[in-house]
Image: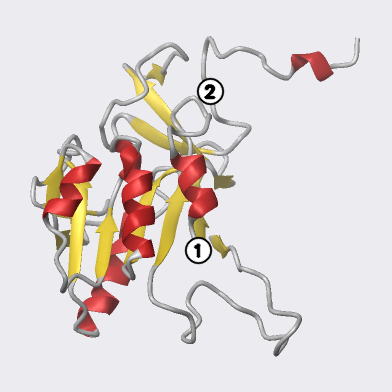
Amino acid sequence: MAFFIVLGYNVFRDQRSVTAMNLTQREGWIEVITGPMFAGKTEELIRRVRRLEYAKKHILVFKPAIDTRYTYDEVVSHNNTRTKSVSITKAREIMDYVTDETQVVAIDEIQFLDEEAVEICEYLAGHGLRVIVSGLDRNFRGEPFSFMPRLLALAEEVTKLTAICVKCQSPATRTQRIINGKPANYNDPIIFVGAQDSYEARCRHCHEVPGKPETYDRFDKK
């Protein structure tokens, strides 16, 4: 399940809808694929990369070096779809690989990079490159993940995917961290890279975070 954010329309000219992929627009934009784990974000990023490869575009694919779940030099989805990539520890390292021939930059799991990733994406898009990134919009606590809200606001196109809740089979929008068979505590570290044995997709109502402050209990009727 997914929806796309559309950019409105020009009421003073031809009344036609204008999306991030309109063929008449100038080159250079940011696309963000987001949602919880197991929603197919990496699968969608690889799909877009492959379509561009068929079109003979010059593409660079990156991933954070911290993500060692599969291989060091490939972006791999949970369904084992994969594409060659470059592992980086800091967002600025992307600029070491970009050349005048580069047309597309793709970044998987961008939330694991430093906050300069946002500026790098803006810079590349401003200089005519198509930037495609995927990443979690929320951390295991259910809160916005680092700089992702800012990146979502700056992007021309946002694709928000949902998974299936393992508890009730409703659309899942949150990532449940499991440690030793139990939900992780609110005060546990934010970054803990793992796979199915560490995380589950959950809906709003089945998501559990012991120790999480009751931020909205002031709205309860006394």
Horizontal side of residue 53 vs 162, given as left or right: left
- As helix, strand or loop, the secondary structure at mark 2 comes to loop
Residue that lies at the very extreme toward the bottom in this rendered image? 14
Front-lying residue, 176 or 180: 176
Vertical placement of residue 13 versus 177, above or below: below
Residue 162 in sight in this render: no
Say few, some or many: other residues with alpha carbon within 10 Å of mark 2 (under 14 / 14 to 19 / 20 or more).
many
Residue 222 percent coordinates (x, y) = 91, 9
Across and down, in percent, residue 15 comes to: 73, 86
Q: Is residue 11 above or below residue 190?
A: below
- Residue 205, numbered label: none
Q: Residue at x 83, y 19 (%)?
A: 219
Side (left or right) of 44 relative to 175? left
Instruction: For the residues labelled 1 and 2, say whether their Cβ atoms are less than 8 Å apart.
Output: no
Q: Position of residue 138 (x, y in %)?
A: 48, 36
The three-letter code of the residue at mark 2 reads Glu
In the rendered structure, the answer to whether residue 210 lies left or right of residue 199 reads right
Q: Residue at x 16, y 71 (%)?
A: 100
Instruction: Return the residue at label 2.
Output: 208
Q: Which mark is residue 157?
A: 1
Residue positioned 61% across, 35% down in the render: 204
Mark 1: amino acid: Glu
Q: How is the image coloured?
A: secondary structure
Give the label, 1 or 2, closer to the camera.
Answer: 1
Residue nearer the viewer, 71 or 154: 154
Q: Residue at x 22, y 61 (%)?
A: 81
Q: Position of residue 6 (x, y in %)?
A: 61, 68
Whether residue 169 is visible to the viewer of this picture, yes or no, is yes
Q: Earlier in the sequence, mark 1 or mark 2?
A: 1
